[in-house]
Amino acid sequence: MTNVSLSTRPQKSMVATSLRIALYTVLLSVAALYLLPFAIMLITSLKDVEEIRTGTLLSLPSTLDFSAWGKAWSSACTGSTCDGIAPFFTNSFQIVVPAVIISTVLGALNGYVLSMWKFRGSEIFFAALLIGCFIPFQVILLPMARTLGWLGIANTTSGLVFVHVVYGIAFTTLFFRNFYQAIPSELVKAARLDGAGFFTIFRRIILPLSTPIIVVTIIWQFTQIWNDFLFGVAFSGFDTQPVTVALNNLVNTSFGGKEYNVDMAAAIMAALPTLIVYVLAGKYFVRGLTAGAVKG
């Protein structure tokens, strides 16, 4: 009996090792396939125009040429101007930073009220607010344009901040409300008995517990706003366009031959901020989700 048991152990170990190798092979293959477009973009951005025309997509550059990166940043033409995408990076940050902060703060307050300070009709209010998560961008273009004109902030950075805050509140409220639902209500009740008010409870009890969902919300909002194109092209002026609109203008503007290396370099630079955010805070994003960010 013992001999049979000992003889089966190496077989089980070999099977487990084979399964592990197969699993890693599949994962590496999927990862390589997923990263292939980025690799092609990077390789293309490091070639000169002539090498792009005569070579293949996956052929490595004979020499590393970073001139396309410099041109995309500072001298590529985006319509009638040739200042690169650098000025539009500033526009995007001027839109993203205040919009993320305001929508996160408002979402936290809304979620706090809807989960801890329920009032008559709060569930109906939450359901109505939730509808905002499913309204397509295109539906609100005309009414939002009229609203921005009425407020006097059309074609301005402030107008785009307003648009993203309004559209983002539904999502941020959903995130915070569902997260706060998992916090024991006894904490709030005990604080009320001790005489703590609405903002005292929020500041001293709720906010210290909210780090995971705050990170989730910031990453979500930053990604959505930075990558937005439709609102940017519809509600911005020439001097307030975000980098996504500038990238589209750069790709569709050409004098002479098409410079694919410049286009690829500009696209990578436009995507870098969101990539950096996910690399630096990705693990906190996962922790926030598993801590109750999307629980109903």
Image: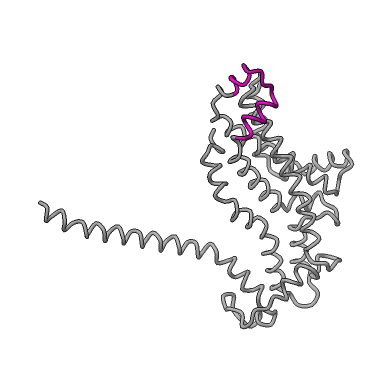
> Which residue is pictured at 82% across the width and 49% down the height?
157
When asked about the image quadrant of residue 186, the answer is top right
Q: Position of residue 54 (x, y in %)?
A: 64, 83
Say if the magenta span includes residue 195: yes
Of the pair 150 and 178, the residue shown nearer to us: 178
Q: Position of residue 18 (x, y in %)?
A: 31, 62
> Which residue is pictured at 66% across the width and 50% down the height?
223
Of the pair 130 and 157, the residue shown nearer to us: 157
When asked about the image quadrant of residue 126, the answer is top right
> Which residue is pictured at 69% across the width and 21% down the height?
197
Q: Position of residue 83 (x, y in %)?
A: 83, 67
Of the pair 156 and 111, the residue shown nearer to us: 111
Say if the magenta span includes residue 207: yes
When asked about the image quadrant of residue 115, the answer is top right
262 up-or-down from 165: above or below: below
Left/right of residue 193 with respect to residue 23 in the rendered view:
right
9 up-or-down from 178: above or below: below
Left/right of residue 207 with respect to residue 9 in the rendered view:
right
- Magenta range is 188-208
Q: Position of residue 280 (x, y in %)?
A: 60, 54
* Quarter of the figure that contains the C terminus: top right
